[in-house]
Amino acid sequence: MNQVYVNELKNHIGEEVTLKGWLYNSRSSGKLLFLLVRDGTGIVQCVVFKPNNESLFETAKSLGQESSIIVRGKVREDARSPIGVELEVTDLEVIQNVEGYPITPKEHGTEFLMDHRHLWIRSRRQHAILRIRHTVVKATRDFLDNRGFILADAPIFTPNACEGTTTLFEVNYFDHDKAYLTQSGQLYNEATAAAFGRSYCFGPVFRAERSKTRRHLTEFWMVEPEMAYATLDDVMNLAEEMVCYVVERVLEERRDDLKTLERDVSKLERIKAPFPRIHYDEAVKILQDGYEKGALENKFEWGGDFGAPDETYLSSQFELPVFVHHFPASIKAFYFERDKERPELALGADLLAPEGYGEIVGGGQRAFDLEFLEKQIAEHNLPREAFEWYLDLRRYGSVPHAGFGMGIERCVAWICGIEHVRETIPFPRMLYRLRP
Ligand code: 4AD
Ligand code: MG
C-alpha cells in the first residue's frame, strides 16, 4: 500500500494511491458523492461514482463527519481544486464510523469551541494558525542558532521571582518551603551568557495574571536570547533582525495559511528594518497628544506604565513595529541597568507590534554592579538568599550584558492577524480556562 499524504498528491497524478485520514465533510449530488478527506497535511476531494460500486457508495454515504477512513483511489488533475488534484475512489476501508461529531460546519460560540479545543484543532483555520506557529518557532530557533547562540534552557521550578512577586504561581516542593513556576528564564540566561557568550532559552513561562484580555495567557512560550558584552542598542538590533527574519520566513513558507486566515499580507511585507525607536519621554508626548485629540480616554502621565489602549494608540502611529526605550525604572523589574545621565530611567526597551497587537518583545541591559543589585533586591523585597547565586554573576567576571524575551503567542497572533492569543497555542491556559 503506497500511502501518500494529501500535500504530496500532485506528484502522483495518474497513480493509484492510499490515503489515511478522516472525513472532513461530504455532500452528494445524484450518483456522485464528494468526500472531503483530511490527513493533517491538507484536504482533498474524493469522488465516489455510484454505478462503479454501489455498496462502496452506500458505505461512504453513511459516514459521519470525522469518521476515520483509509481511501484508495486514482489521482486526477483538477484545475478547480485548490490543491490541483482530486481522487477517484476505488476502495474504502472504514476504521471508525462516527456519529454526532460535536463541531459541525455551522457557527459555534467561542466558549463551546474552547471547551472542544481538542477537536477544534482539526479545523482549517486552527490548522493554519498552528502551522504558522510552527514556522515562527522554527524560524526563531534557526535565527539564533545561525548566529552562534547556544540553546541552554532554564528551569521551570525556581526558588524566586524574576518579574515581580505579584504574578507568581506557587507550588509545593518536597521539604523546601515553596517553589515557583518560572516567569522568565532570564536570570539563568545571564549565567549561561557568562558561560557561552551568547545563549538562549526557549520554553513555557507562567504568569499568575488576573488579566482577562486578548493578549494574556497564564502559560505561554517565550524565547529569550542573552548576550555578554552587550548593551541596550544590541538588544534592539537583535530583536529587530529576528522579527524581520521570522516574518520573512512565514511569508515564504506559509502563504497558503495566511490566505486561509485572510491576512492582509501587504502589511507583513512592509516589515523591514529599521524600526522606529522612541524614548519613553517621546511616547508620553504622543499619548498626551492623543488624549488632547480625543483618541484616548485617559490622560497619560509621565511615570506610568502603558495600558492596552496606550500601546494600541502608540503602535497605530507607525506602520512598523516600534521600540519604546528608557522607561522609568520604578515601573520595571529589579535587574535593569540605569541610564548614567538620568538614573531614574531603566535601560530597557519594549517592541510594540503594529495593528494594536501590543508588546511582543521586552528586554534590556542588565545591572552590572554588585552593590547596586543588592540594593535593588532589598528595595523590591526579594528574598536575598534565593538570589545569592545570581549575585555571584556580579562577583565573578561581571560584564555589561543584555537580552530580551519574545512572547511566541503574541507574535503569532500579530502575524496571523487574529483577534486573540488563545488560538495561537494548541491548549491555552487562561484565568478561567484549565481545560481541556
Ligand atoms: O516583558 P516581559 O515580562 O519580559 C521578561 O520576562 C524578561 N525577563 C524577558 C527577558 O529580558 N529575557 O515578557 C516578555 C514578552 C512580552 O513582550 C510579551 O510578548 C510576552 O512575553 N508576554 C506574554 N504573552 C502572553 N501572555 C502574557 N501574560 C504575557 N506576558 C508577557
Ligand atoms: Mg514587558
Image: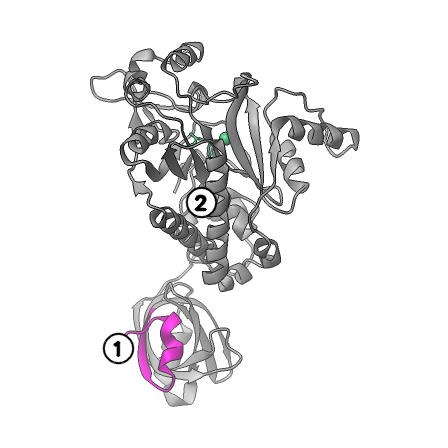
Q: Quadrant of the N terminus?
A: bottom left
Q: In the rendered structure, which amino acid carries the disc numbered 1?
A: Asn
- Neighbour tally class for label 2: few under 14, some 14-19, many 20 plus, Cα within 10 Å: some
Q: In the rendered structure, which amino acid carries the disc numbered 2?
A: Asp
Mark 2 → mark 1, Cα distance in angstroms = 37 Å
Q: Which residue is drawn at 50% across and 38% down?
A: 236
Q: Say whether residue 61 is left or right of residue 416.
A: left
Q: Label 1: which residue? A: 2
Q: What stretch is highlighted in magenta?
A: 1-20
Return the residue nearer the eye: 53 or 126.
126
Protein image colouring: one colour
User: How far across and how far down the image is residue 187, in percent?
Assistant: 35, 27
**Is residue 9 a member of the stretch shown in magenta?**
yes
User: How far across and how far down the image is residue 359, in percent?
Assistant: 54, 36
Q: Say whether residue 99 is left or right of residue 318.
A: left
| Labels 2 and 1: the sequence-earlier one | 1
Q: Say whether residue 230 is left or right of residue 314.
A: left
Number of labelled discs?
2
